[in-house]
Every structure is written in C-alpha cells, then in structure tokens.
Image (spheres, helix red, strand yellow):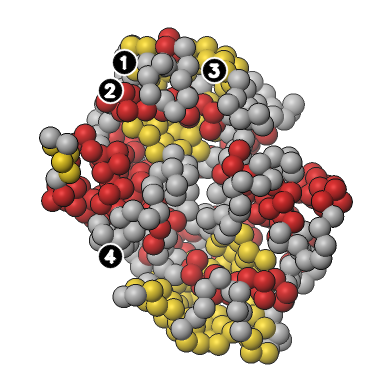
C-alpha cells in the first residue's frame, strides 16, 4: 500500500495554473524526487501535501484512505513534516521556541533543549538552541528547520532544497540520515536542483514542467544531463569561464579587518584581508554562521568600519554607507532575497527601482514610470523570470524566480564591483547555468566580483581564486585550478585534518 497518493491535483492562483492534474505515488521507505524548473509547481504541490495550500481539484490518499489536509497541524498529526525553501520560522523568538511550537504535547523547554543539542551533534546540524532566530544566517536557519522535522519522527518528510547551504561532508551526513529514516519506513519527498545528489540519493523521480507531470525516471539509471533534459525540455547550456584579466590595481580591497559582531551571538572578524582585481571572480566558501554575514554587512556599507579597512578603486570607503558605496560603483545581491534583496509586497517594477534608481529612473525627484517598467521588463526577459510582468508582486514569485530577478537587477546595473551571496540558491539547472555565465561575462568586461557561496561546485565553476572563511578568519586565496573539493570542505568545517589551503 502506498504511503501517499495524489490523483489529478490542480491548483490555480488567479490566471496562473500552478498544478495541472498532477498525480504521483510514494511508497513507504521510498526517497522520491520531484524535479522541475523554477515555477514548475513543485513547491505549491508540496504545500498542498502539507496542508498549507488547499487544492482546487483532485484527491489525496494517505495509507490508501482519502484525506483532507486542512492545515499543517493536520498534516503533522498524520506524520508529515516539511522543510520549506523559504523557512517558516518566527524571527523574534529563540531557536528552541521555534522548535517547541511545532511539537505536540506540553512544553518542556529544558528537556527539548537537550534533545535539540543531542540530535544536532548526532547529525552534524549543530545550532545554539537559545539564540534568537533573527541573529541566525540562512544556513543556520535551515538546520533549525531540519531539526524541527526530525524531532517529530516523521512518516513522510518533505525537503525543499535541503543541501543548498551545506558542505559536501554535511550533505553526505544528511544523506546518511535520510537513508536511515527511509530504511525505517519513513517516506521522503525530495526537491533539489543538484542533479548529482538526486542520482545518488533518490529511488525514483517525478518531473514537472509548467505545472504538469511530463515524465518519470529512475535517477540512478539516468545521467544528470538526461534528467536536466527532462526538466527543461532541451539541452542545458554549459558554462564557459575563459581567462581572467591580468593583474591590475584591485577594485575591492579589505585590509586587516577585525571587528566584534553587532549581534551578541555573532562572529568576530579576525584580520580579514582580500583583494579582487578587475576581470576576476574571487570566491569565499564557508559553512553558514562563520562570519560571512558580518563580512558582507561591512563590505556593502551596512556596518561601518575604519575607513582604510575597505577600499574601492584604491579609495578608503570603510566609513561610507550603502548609498555612497553604490554611488562609487559597488552593487550587492544578498542571500536573503525576500525581505533584504526584495520587498514582498512591492511590485517587481518598484523593486527594480530600489537599487536601479540611479540609472535614470528618477529625474528631478520624480520617478520615470515608463523607464522603471522598461528596466524591470528587461530583467524579466533577459533572466527568464517567470511572472505576469513588472506589476507582479515580489512575494508572488517562486524562490528561484525571485533569485533570478534580484541577481539580474544587480548585474543589469553593470557595476564596477559586484558582491553576491548564494547567487543560484534554489535556482534550476538551466537558470543557474545562465546566471553563472552572466556573472562570468560581467567580470570579463572588467568588473571585480566577490561571490560568497556554500555551493563548492558553483564556486569552482565560476571563480578564478577561492578562499575559505571559518570562525571569522579568512584563509589566503588560491587558484581554483586543481583545487581539492574535499580539502575545501574540511577547511569549511574547521577540521584538524585539513591541510593548509593557500598555494
């Protein structure tokens, strides 16, 4: 008997048909992948299963019995847990309290704190249970979501891009956890754009395109290229890096930056130094929570430093704010695409205006609406953002499509320096290849790019040099050519087994 069965499930949002008569089955102990491009309807379908969205048509069967998933609480009573791509956490309370609200029974916070700590150590998902949620990085929040689900002993676990911010070693530990759960009879629905991990982990796959089921596959018997072709309906473009420009005066420099965190639970930066030349991409790898967010806040101007600690084109700018640095040619795409990179309740046109206003979109203090709409439309068209147009609210887009818009907006500004965090997080394979190629092209046009990512495959594909940050200390940068992925992963984890990285 199947653990879960969907029969002809459909869901419409206004004029958009997100799911069109989708059917699939998941057996006990099966790890089942759901594949598709951004906007293919994967996340909507998972929310229907979890009770967060109600279908317009179709039936859901649990253990062969028709059921109505009225809300997430109902789904949890059936034994369904879900880790969202956009996390469902409360910003103003602690990690422990975020976990407690999803647990049945009376609150026993001290006992729960011990369970959280033990489970985190067991699965390599450590996080301080007493930290306030809004102090955590994206990667740390993902650990909270995963731990919260594992503590509920789920019978069906839904994971939406669970390894996006994990090291290779941590991802393998998670795979071991998932295999152990599956061996015990837990069913797993798994969404990821990392096709190699789909092939390694999953027993079967259902492929969605434009809200419809267009095929199925046995991932272990298919190549990554074949799976990508099923998803996209065409061959996925390759990324050509080309050569970096020769040595020149750095466009962006950080000199011996040491700074205590603004957040009492944050990371102290210790003697951070780096330089990014015109025509070059420098990558920074690291597990979330090791100082990346603190460093990015200093570099973009949200947190001031001593003037000489940060230089743009040789000029000290550490004391300048965000607007002043943008006026000098620096652009920034943060990892928090919703809330920091874009305002959910504003249209894409107005979100384009937030950082693109200096591109002739405002004149004499007045917004030039025609040019603003044209700017947003150009980003939508060039970066393949699936939406109804510039008037679409940012919050209505899928995670991957919003990511394409936020990164595309900064690339479209043609900055002299671009700092981007997690550039292809949650983006499908074809769109990721396009975004990476645009970043490379921007650098080869003479811009200096600093890319912070936990996706080592991405960094090695697009970067010329790479450094590792751990507990607020940045390693010397080394050429990507010939770099050992395992060694970087060990450095990211702070392992004593890691060898010196710098060439």
How many numbered discs?
4
- From the viewer's side, name the closer residue of 238 and 210: 210
Q: Mark 3: few, some, or many residues within 10 Å (few <14, many ≥20)? A: some
Q: Quadrant of residue 392?
A: bottom left
The residue located at (28%, 46%) in the rendering is 352
Choose the circle earlier in sequence order: 3 or 2. Answer: 3
Quickly name the residue at label 2: 328
Q: How far apart are marks 3 and 4 (CA)?
A: 44 Å
3 or 2: mark nearer the eye: 2
Side of 161 relative to 100 (left or right):
left
Q: Which mark is residue 313?
A: 1
In the image, farthest residue toward the right? 111
Choose the circle earlier in sequence order: 1 or 3. Answer: 3
Q: What element carries label 3?
A: strand
Quickly name the residue at label 3: 272
Quickly name the residue at label 4: 388
Q: Is mark 1 on a helix, strand or loop?
A: loop
Tell me if I can see residue 367 in this picture: yes
Side of 119 relative to 6 (left or right):
right
The residue located at (25%, 52%) in the rendering is 349
Mark 3 vs 2: CB contact within 8 A: no
Choose the circle earlier in sequence order: 2 or 1. Answer: 1
Q: Distance between the residues labelled 2 and 1?
A: 9 Å
1 or 4: mark nearer the eye: 4
Q: Distance between the residues labelled 4 and 2?
A: 34 Å
**Residue 315, above or below 335:** above
Mark 2 vs 1: CB contact within 8 A: yes
The residue located at (41%, 16%) in the rendering is 319
Q: Distance between the residues labelled 3 and 2?
A: 22 Å
Q: Quadrant for the N terminus, please.
A: bottom right
Mark 3 vs 4: CB contact within 8 A: no
């Amino acid at each position: 008997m199947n653990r879960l069965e969907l029969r002809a499930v459909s869901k419409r949002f206004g004029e958009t048909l997100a799911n069109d008569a989708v059917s699939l089955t998941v057996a006990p102990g099966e790890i089942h992948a759901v594949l598709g491009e951004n906007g293919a309807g994967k996340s909507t379908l998972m929310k229907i299963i979890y009770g967060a969205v109600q279908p317009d048509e179709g039936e859901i069967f649990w253990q062969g019995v028709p059921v109505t998933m009225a809300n997430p609480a109902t789904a949890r009573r059936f034994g369904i847990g879900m880790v969202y791509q956009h996390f469902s956490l409360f910003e103003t309370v602690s990690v422990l309290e975020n976990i407690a609200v999803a647990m049945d029974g009376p609150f026993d916070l001290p006992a729960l704190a011990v369970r959280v700590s033990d489970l985190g150590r067991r699965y390599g998902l450590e996080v301080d249970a007493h930290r306030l949620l809004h102090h955590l990085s994206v990667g740390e929040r993902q650990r909270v979501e995963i731990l919260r689900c594992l503590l509920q002993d789920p019978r069906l676990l839904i994971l939406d891009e669970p390894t996006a911010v994990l090291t290779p070693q941590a991802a393998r530990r998670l795979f071991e956890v998932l295999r152990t759960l599956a061996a015990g009879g837990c069913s797993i629905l798994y969404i990821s754009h990392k096709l190699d991990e789909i092939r390694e982990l999953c027993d079967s796959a259902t492929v969605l395109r434009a809200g419809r089921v267009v095929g199925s596959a046995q991932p272990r018997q298919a190549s990554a290229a074949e799976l990508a072709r099923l998803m996209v309906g065409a061959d996925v473009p390759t990324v050509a890096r080309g050569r970096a420009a020769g040595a020149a005066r750095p466009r962006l420099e950080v000199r011996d930056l040491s700074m205590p965190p603004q957040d009492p639970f944050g990371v102290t930066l210790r003697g951070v130094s780096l330089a990014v030349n015109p025509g070059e991409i420098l990558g920074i790898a690291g597990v979330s929570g090791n100082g990346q967010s603190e460093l990015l806040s200093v570099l973009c101007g949200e947190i001031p430093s001593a003037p000489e600690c940060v230089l743009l084109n040789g000029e000290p700018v550490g004391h300048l704010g965000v607007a002043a640095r943008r006026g000098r040619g620096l652009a920034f795409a943060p990892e928090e695409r919703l809330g920091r990179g874009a305002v959910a309740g504003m249209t894409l046109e107005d979100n384009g205006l937030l950082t693109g206003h200096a591109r002739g979109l405002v004149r004499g203090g007045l917004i030039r609406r025609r040019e603003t709409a044209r700017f947003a439309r150009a980003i939508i068209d060039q970066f393949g953002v699936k939406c109804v147009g510039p008037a679409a609210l940012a919050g209505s887009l899928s995670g991957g499509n919003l990511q394409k818009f936020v990164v595309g907006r900064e690339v479209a500004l043609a900055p002299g320096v671009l700092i981007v965090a997690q550039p292809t997080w949650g983006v499908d394979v074809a769109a990721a290849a396009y975004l990476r190629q645009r970043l490379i092209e921007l650098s080869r046009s003479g811009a200096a790019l600093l890319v912070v990512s936990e996706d080592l495959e991405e960094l090695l594909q697009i970067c010329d040099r790479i450094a590792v940050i751990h507990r607020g200390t940045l390693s010397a940068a080394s050429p990507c050519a010939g770099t050992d992925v395992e060694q970087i992963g060990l450095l990211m984890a702070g392992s004593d087994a890691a060898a010196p990285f710098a060439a």
